[in-house]
Image (cartoon, rainbow, N blue to C red):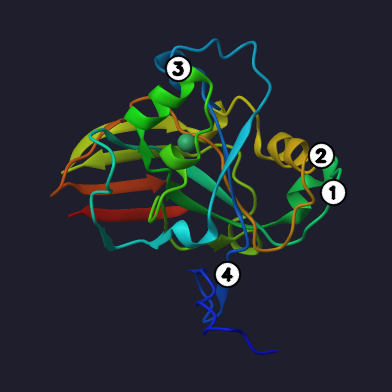
Amino acid sequence: MTYVFPIWQQPSVPVAGSPALFPVRRIFCVGRNYAAHAREMGSDPDREPPFFFTKPADAIVASGSAVPYPPATANLHHEIELVVAIGQGGANIEAGQALGHVFGYAAGIDLTRRDLQNAAKAVGQPWDMSKGFDQSAPIGTIRPATEIGHPGQAGIRLSVNGVLRQHGNIADLIWSVPETIATLSRLVTLAAGDLIYTGTPEGVGPLKAGDQVAGEIDGIGTVTIHIT
Ligand code: MN
């Protein structure tokens, strides 16, 4: 096969303990999946089924990278999230079978142009440009489930310049990883290479140029970026 111009590089994420990379196919994200964060965003966490938005695969940023403050926003926010890496695809996956489709887990940051998101919400417009912009999906090394299993609880936190901003526990996900996979697989056919950012705990807040951002999920991994 030839193309009319050179094909771009496949976005990928390092895998712990392996020289092989995880090739990123699509990036799905869950909205408002921790009760306290849903409340801080002005929603009722008890009345909402899970909902999804996406980022382009090439929004991936390797941990340790410098990320330029993005254009078209004056309110860039951090959201630390557990990321599920899908290793086996499928449609209409039962929650009881869902973990068998998981390759591994990582810590990720769902960077958000909060001002654009709030403006979009106010008039019922899509979130694409507030969520799916360039370099909006930093992610750390993926830890294979064959190594760490499927953690049901783990501390999750994010600090900016050494000051703790977010902390929670993945046990407090409103929709668990199996439920999220089951629900998403009824909307699209999942495939190996898909990533799911599962939502953020409370404490989201603004970033500025110069900030050192460090996220961590106990037993899973870290993700760091430097805003320039
Ligand atoms: Mn998020």
Sequence order check, earlier mark of 2 and 1: 1
Amino acid at dot 2: Arg
In the foreground, 4 or 68: 4
Number of labels in the image equals: 4
Q: Can residue 219 be seen in this snapshot?
A: no
Between the residue at mark 3 and the residue at mark 2, the CA separation in whole angstroms equals 28 Å
> Which of pointers 2 and 4 indicates the residue nearer the eye?
2
Pointer 1 with pointer 3, Cβ within 8 A: no
Where's residue 148, x and y in %? 58, 57
Q: Which residue is mark 2?
A: 186
Residue kind at label 1, given as amino acid type = Ala
Marks 1 and 2: in contact by CB < 8 Å?
A: yes
Amino acid identity at mark 3: Ala
Q: Residue furthest bottom?
A: 2
Label 1 belongs to which residue? 91
x, y percent for residue 24? 58, 64
Secondary structure beneath dot 3 equals helix
